[in-house]
Amino acid sequence: MTQKVLLLPGDGIGPEIVAEAVNVLEALKANHGLDIDMVSGLVGGAAYDVSGHPLPEETMQMARDVDAILLGAVGGYKWETLDISVRPEKGLLGLRSGLGLFANLRPAFLYPQLADASSLKPEVVSGLDILIVRELTGGIYFGQPRGIRTLENGERQGYNTYVYSESEIERIGHVAFQAAMKRNKKVCSVDKANVLEVTELWREVMTDLAQQYPDVELSHMYVDNAAMQLVRNPKQFDVIVTGNMFGDILSDEASMLTGSIGMLPSASLDANNKGMYEPSHGSAPDIAGQNLANPLATILSAAMMLRYSLGREDLAIKIEQAVSKVLDQGLRTGDIYSKGMQKVSTSEMGSAVVKALG
Ligand code: NAD
């Protein structure tokens, strides 16, 4: 049966990078038996400009109807002064919570061809292959109450609530342990259990859960130490599981170990493996519209979509091999460029991947 994919290019470089991923998917449809229908919708600032809301009901309905979503990025200078309730990022948070996408998978994988692009020494990062599993629909980003209030003395006070229930911790824990079973069988749970009760509970639940996965080695680490260990000795990690805010920060840190945020895909899954796929980076307004952005994170997000939501592991591997091939050919966008390589544009990089699919 034909599967349906919703494309949400969004803002900034979003439309440019999604266009290249679409070219790759079209090539797989034409030559490699991929059976999907693609429809497009509006999200983020692009949706706000048309409808006054970053996540119009029409987009939400389309998102509910499809098998998977491929998103570019949202946000930009133009919308920074809007009320927080209609900022582009709210569109993304609304999709994640509205679709129950509670598990964010962010691989930090270093292509050997790019070992020199990392700011760390090649021997520290070569062979790096970490999967960060971040809880995405709970924690302090969603906890109530929240807001800015005025105290009796007239001073303003901002406040948020960091909250996790046992069931929320358990379901993200299962995702991490199951992922580890297919990898190197190590899970490091990151928390701040020495200071925050909510993560004391997190640690207890993870420890209990580990009994169901006797083949997986569970360790615990405080988030400040994890941030340090990621730059000191990142290869000690296999799967890292953590809450929403710590995962947000650590996954960006891990992405830089690989040289460029422009290389890293991500998946956000619900309990049935329906997912939203997007590059780990933002909308890069500083380079938007200039044909400079690296489209590989988005193309690799399409590969993750084929693997996790559309049941086409074979075509996911085909895309990943094609990306490796263009890197072998020495093609580099500006963000991963080094001396002696061939600097290419967004569209040239995308076309090279299509060609390398064979
Ligand atoms: P960013 O990831 O957009 O950019 C950080 C730096 O990395 C910039 O110098 C940018 O040019 C570069 N960069 C990012 N992606 C690149 C790519 N594919 N190729 C080459 N270079 C790339 O982060 P930011 O500057 O903090 O945020 C910019 C906007 O994006 C903000 O409005 C922010 O809210 C939004 N944002 C959106 C998402 C999302 O849609 N998932 C995530 C993070 C930030």
Image (cartoon, helix red, strand yellow):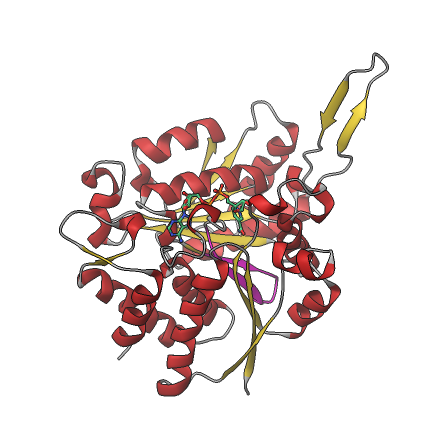
Does residue 267 belong to the magenta stretch? yes
Please tell me in which quadrant of the rendered image residue 4 appears: bottom right
The x and y percentages for residue 201 are 63, 35
Q: Residue at x 25, y 63 (%)?
A: 324
Image side of residue 64 versus residue 249, left or right: right
The x and y percentages for residue 220 are 47, 35
Residue closer to the observer: 254 or 331 = 331
Q: Is residue 102 above or below residue 27?
A: above
Which residue extends farthest right?
152
Image side of residue 2 versus residue 160, left or right: left
Q: Which residues are magenta?
A: 266-280
Does residue 47 belong to the magenta stretch? no
Residue closer to the observer: 92 or 181 = 92
Q: Residue at x 30, y 31 (%)?
A: 232
Q: Residue at x 32, y 38 (%)?
A: 234
Please tell me in which quadrant of the rendered image residue 196 appears: top right
Quarter placement of the N terminus:
bottom right
Q: Residue at x 65, y 33 (%)?
A: 198
The x and y percentages for residue 197 are 65, 28
Predominant SS of the magenta segment:
strand
